[in-house]
Image (spheres, rainbow, N blue to C red):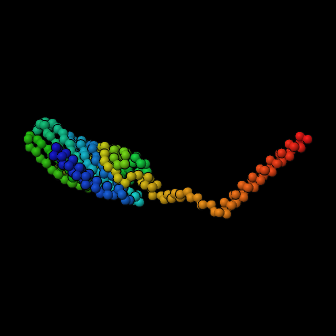
């Protein structure tokens, strides 16, 4: 179990880091997307996997699209492991370990009209590998198998600042694998926290930025021509004449009243 946990962690980190350079390059054009780490749990079918039906899970979930695409391409890699013990009246205590890994391909719809809150749903095909390991009386037997099924999930995440994601997701997956001569369910219910990286910004914000804005025309005053200046001088002289006539009229009026 420790080996699987180390492998899953290393695999997730490698995939996550390999995505960042293309993501940064895509941020400057018409692409947008997310690369998130998932930390959570997976519940296998109890009838097939008890007492190791409860697993811890880790993985990387990615999605990307051009801005004019309605859906994003989704590529998710998940790994989970669990263990438990049961008591058999004849053999005594038995230990069971379970390991599953899933490569999930499909599409994801992300509503990114808001600059920070992005709910999403997705689905597609899931390629599952399962391993069961049983130890009884110091003897360990192991078997692995693989199969193909489907997955469906949804959740929401918040983008803090320009690119830091945090959120949660729930999903279910199906698919059977043949172990110890029997077909058993290798998919299950998944749930966990998301933390990761977003590039491309908000579609709403980018659409607004793409709209053409009218260029500011600097204020410009046409210099007055000589004719206009002359007309202004004439108006000023006429005004002065009117003021003079008004004063003369007032003077004559006062003079007449004095007599």
Q: Does 89 sit above or below residue 142?
A: above
| Residue 167 shows in the view | yes
The quarter of the displayed image where residue 256 is located: top right
Question: What residue appears at the point 37 percent right and 48 percent down from the top-left corner?
Answer: 162
Question: What residue appears at the point 81 percent right and 51 percent down from the top-left corner?
Answer: 245
Relative image position of residue 191 (x, y in whole percent): 30, 44
Question: What residue appears at the point 70 percent right and 57 percent down from the top-left corner?
Answer: 233
Between 112 and 75, which is closer to the camera in this rendering? 112
The quarter of the displayed image where residue 258 is located: top right
Relative image position of residue 71 (x, y in whole percent): 38, 57
On-image quarter of the C terminus? top right
Looking at the rendered structure, the number of numbered marks drawn on it comes to 0
Between 140 and 229, which is closer to the camera in this rendering? 229
Between 249 and 204, which is closer to the camera in this rendering? 249
Which residue occupies the extreme left position in the image?
138
On-image quarter of the N terminus? top left
Residue 210 lies left or right of residue 126; in this view the side is right
Question: What residue appears at the point 66 percent right and 60 percent down from the top-left corner?
Answer: 229
Relative image position of residue 77 (x, y in whole percent): 26, 52
Between 145 and 239, which is closer to the camera in this rendering? 239
| Residue 124 shows in the view | no
Residue 143 lies left or right of residue 13; in this view the side is left
Residue 169 lies left or right of residue 18; in this view the side is right
Relative image position of residue 132 (x, y in whole percent): 17, 47
């Amino acid at each position: 179990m420790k080996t699987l946990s180390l492998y899953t962690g290393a695999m997730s980190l490698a995939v996550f880091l390999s995505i960042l350079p293309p993501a940064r390059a895509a941020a400057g054009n018409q692409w947008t997307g997310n690369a998130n780490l998932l930390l959570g749990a997976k519940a296998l079918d109890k009838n097939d996997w008890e007492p190791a039906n409860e697993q811890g899970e880790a993985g990387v979930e990615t999605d990307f699209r051009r801005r004019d695409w309605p859906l994003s391409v989704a590529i998710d890699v998940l790994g989970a492991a669990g263990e438990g013990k049961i008591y058999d009246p004849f053999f005594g205590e038995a230990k069971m370990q379970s390991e599953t890994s899933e490569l999930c391909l499909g599409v994801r719809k992300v509503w990114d009209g808001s600059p920070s809150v992005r709910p999403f749903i997705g689905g597609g095909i899931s390629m599952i590998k399962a391993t069961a390991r049983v130890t009884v009386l110091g003897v360990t037997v192991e078997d692995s198998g693989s199969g193909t099924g489907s997955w469906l999930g949804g959740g929401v995440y918040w983008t803090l600042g320009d690119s830091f994601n945090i959120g949660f997701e729930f999903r279910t997956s199906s698919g059977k694998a043949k172990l110890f001569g029997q077909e058993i369910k290798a998919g299950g219910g998944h749930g966990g926290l998301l933390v990761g990286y977003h590039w491309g910004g908000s579609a709403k914000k980018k659409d607004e930025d793409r709209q053409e804005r009218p260029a500011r025309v600097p204020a410009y005053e046409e210099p007055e021509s000589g004719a206009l200046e002359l007309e202004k001088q004439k108006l000023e002289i006429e005004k002065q004449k009117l003021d003079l006539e008004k004063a003369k009229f007032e003077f004559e009026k006062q003079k007449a009243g004095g007599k």
